[in-house]
Image: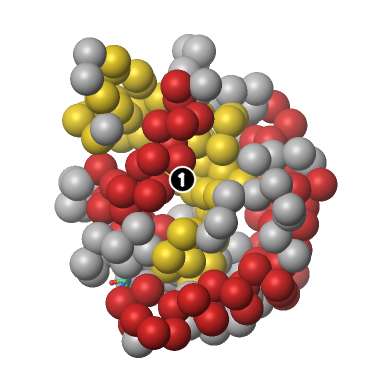
Amino acid sequence: FNIVDAQYVASAVKFDQYPEGELTEIAFIGRSNVGKSSLINSLCRRHGLARISSTPGKTQTLNFYRLSAKTGDFRHDFFLVDLPGYGYARTGRSARQEWSKFIQEYWLKSTRLVLVCQLIDIRHPPMASDVKVYEWLTTHNLPVQVVATKADKIAKGRIKSHLEIIRKEIKLTAAANPIIAFSAENGQGRAEILDVIRNILLK
Ligand code: GDP
């Protein structure tokens, strides 16, 4: 199973700008600078598909990419939706409120969303905003896959205990998939994320 094609389709700030069609959507969210663009580029094996931001917190649009996944004879197109980062220290209260309105509109209006990948930095305990967003998503019955990013930045032997801290702090639901440790540097966890996507698409 792999991504064989990835194209940028559209950016949107509101519902009527979402691309048309019946394609399944998989969304990616996380705090600004968590490594979301790097993860998207790694999944698609396309350098520069999603912009690696030098000014975190700037991208306040939903970005839609059309991806083609292939396994054997089976080819499945879907939208990868890159949501704006949350919790950037320098965005004030109004920007945060705007973020949540934005995301709520997306969640309420998108009937095609099947999975949200929430990215959390593996190095530190989750921030309050990470916990809040996870809680918000799960109370709205969204299937969430938590991905712990930048796994290459901590010693291999400590990955397990860091994942455990994240699991406890966000109160990972009993039915949830285990958290995946990911690194855009060395590709760790890439196959696992693709596997989760594959299982969702084949359902
Ligand atoms: P975004 O704001 O969430 O889209 O984050 P970016 O993908 O732009 O990454 C933010 C910074 O973290 C950049 O300097 C990246 O090079 C770095 N980064 C992202 N992922 C990784 C990773 O897996 N390992 C390491 N060592 N650095 C990473």
Image position, residue 89 (x, y; %): 60, 79
Question: For residue 37, what is the image quadrant?
Answer: bottom left
Please indicate whether residue 185 sits to the left or right of residue 110 in the image: left
Instruction: Note whether 25 is above or below 48 in the view shown.
Output: above
Q: Is residue 94 visible?
A: no
User: Residue 134 is drawn in which quadrant?
Assistant: bottom right
Query: Mark 1 Cα within 10 Å, few/some/many (few <14, many 20+)?
Result: many
- Residue 109 drawn at (x, y percent): 69, 27
Q: Quadrant of the N terminus?
A: top left
Q: Name above or below for residue 153 compared with residue 17.
A: below
Helix, strand or loop status at disc 1: strand
- The percent coordinates of residue 79 (x first, y second) are 42, 29
Corner quadrant of residue 158: bottom left
Taking depth in this image into account, of 87 and 45 the one nearest to the observer is 45
**Residue at point 21% right, 30% down?**
5
Q: Quadrant of ligand 1?
A: bottom left
Residue drawn at 64 percent across, 27 percent down = 110
Inspect the image, locate mark 1, and give the three-letter code of the amino acid beneath it: Asp
- The residue that appears at 46% across and 45% down in the rendered structure is 82
141 lies left or right of 130: right
Q: Is residue 19 above or below residue 122?
A: above
Which residue extends farthest right? Answer: 139
Q: Which residue is mark 1?
A: 82
